[in-house]
Structure formats: C-alpha cells, structure tokens
Amino acid sequence: MTQDETTDEAISLLQDLGLQEYEARCFMALNKLPSGTAKEIHEISEVPRTRVYDAIRVLESQGLVEVQHSSPQVYRAVGTDEATQILRQRYNDRVDTLETHLQNTKTEEIEDDSSVQEVWSLRGHDAIESRTLELIRGADSEVALLVVDEGILSESLFDTLRAAADRELSVVLGGQTDSITQSLERALPESRVFETGLDWLTGPKVDEVAISRILLVDRETLLIGSYYPKAEADEPAEQAVFAKGLQNGVVVLLRRLLTAGLPPVEDPGK
C-alpha cells in the first residue's frame, strides 16, 4: 500500500469514528508535520484554507490538536497514543449510548416457546460470523459445529468455542477436510473432532454453491451458511439461514443428520 493509499484509508477510518472529512484531512496533515500553520495544512490536506480554521477548532475542542497562539497561529497534532485513546473512548461512549437507547426502545420480547417456527436469513461473512459467535455464547448444553469452508476458521471462533468448553458444554466439531480437522484439533484439543464424509456439502464442482458451515446449538437452534463462488463484487459471497424451535422441520432434519451417534443430552426445552 502506497503512502497516499495509507493516508486515504486513515482519513476514511477517522470519518468512520465520527470526524468530518475536512477535520480528518487536517488531522492527517498535521500528523505528517511536527507543527504547521493554516497555510501549510491547506497545502498538504487540500482543504480550502477558509475551512481549515473551522476544522482545527473542532479538532482542538476534541483534544486532538494543540494551538500555539503566535502570529500566525501554529498547530500540532497530539501524539498517536493520545489521539487513538481519545478516539477509542469517544467510539466506546457512542456505542454505550446507542446500547442504552436500543434497550430503552426495545419492544417487549414474547415469552419463549420452543414450538414457534422461526427461520431468518443473514448476508455477508461478518454478519454470519457475529451470529455464529452469539449462538455459541448462548448455548446451554451442546455446540455441534461442522466446518466446510476453511475460510471461516478464525481466532474469534476458536476463542468462543474454548469458552464454551470451559463452561463444560459438550463441544463437537466436524471438518470437511483433513486440513480443517487438523486445525480444529490443534486449536481445541479437548473437544471431540471428527471428519465428515458428507461430500455432497461441497458439490462436484468448485464453482457451485456449497455449504460453508452448519451450527447446531442445544439441538434446537440451527445455522446453515452457504458460499456463492460466482457472487458479484457488490454481493456477499456467504449467506446463511438460522432456525429455532424443536418442532421446526429444518432443525429436526439437520439435528438428526449432525447428531447421529452423539450421546443424548437433556432436552433444553424441559
């Protein structure tokens, strides 16, 4: 990545963290200088000079820029550690505030009924990964995970599975290939790992739609991910559905497929 590309990426990230474009550009300009005047910031950042002053005032109020009251005034960015700490705290504060607002506006949940038929869909690796981890964290008795696409293996997944095992849950892991099985065994040596013989999960051709993951939690909640090799650039390559309810036909079918030969566990609905 070139320096210009790195700068553009940093500006984009600063905007994601709440800065306006001119503020982010001015901050990055000062990050390249020991200190600078409005004219120098303008020349490096390509922010209109009249807008530099407004951007600097905002950055100063947020503790990201210091001002030397000389003629002309000179500005400098605070150190990297201090700046990242300020931005991290600001981001965390926003998330905490959002969480409070979401909780205060959340509709009252319907009392749990294991006979309710629920099937929901998800699109995109990040969303599916997040739901996978959430379902594992919420497990009460058993986690059965079949990994078909090696690309879904991550440290976050391993850490969450280890935490489930530490809670003394039954953790059963399956890999579609030797490589996946070995990765699971190395990361989770205390869990039961098997290699599945279900070749139909991937299909005969590499460019066909294939299963990427199957997760069964407490033998009542199921997530199935599928991978689309020919997805367009603006389309997510991975999609998934997850279903809940002991009476759900999809759950019943995959439960029998995945748990064949596993020891019985107490029905979580009882």
Image: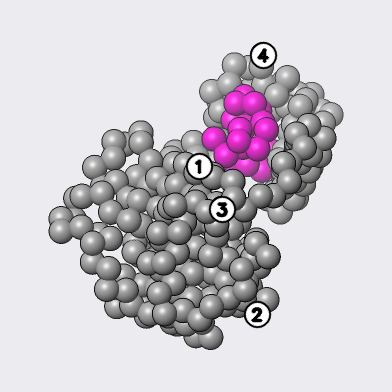
Q: Residue at x 49, y 85 (%)?
A: 189
- The count of marks equals 4
Q: Residue at x 49, y 63 (%)?
A: 216
* Residue 116, placed above or below residue 58: below
The alpha-carbon separation of the residues under discs 2 and 3 comes to 23 Å
The kind of residue tagged 2 is: Glu
The kind of residue tagged 3 is: Gly
The first of marks 4 and 2 along the sequence is 4
Q: Nearer the viewer, mark 2 or mark 3?
A: 3
Residue span colored magenta: 12-36
**Image quadrant in which you'd find residue 146:** bottom left
Which residue has dot 3 on it? 245
Label 1 sits on a secondary structure element that is strand
The first of marks 1 and 3 along the sequence is 1
Which residue has dot 4 on it? 50
Label 2 sits on a secondary structure element that is loop
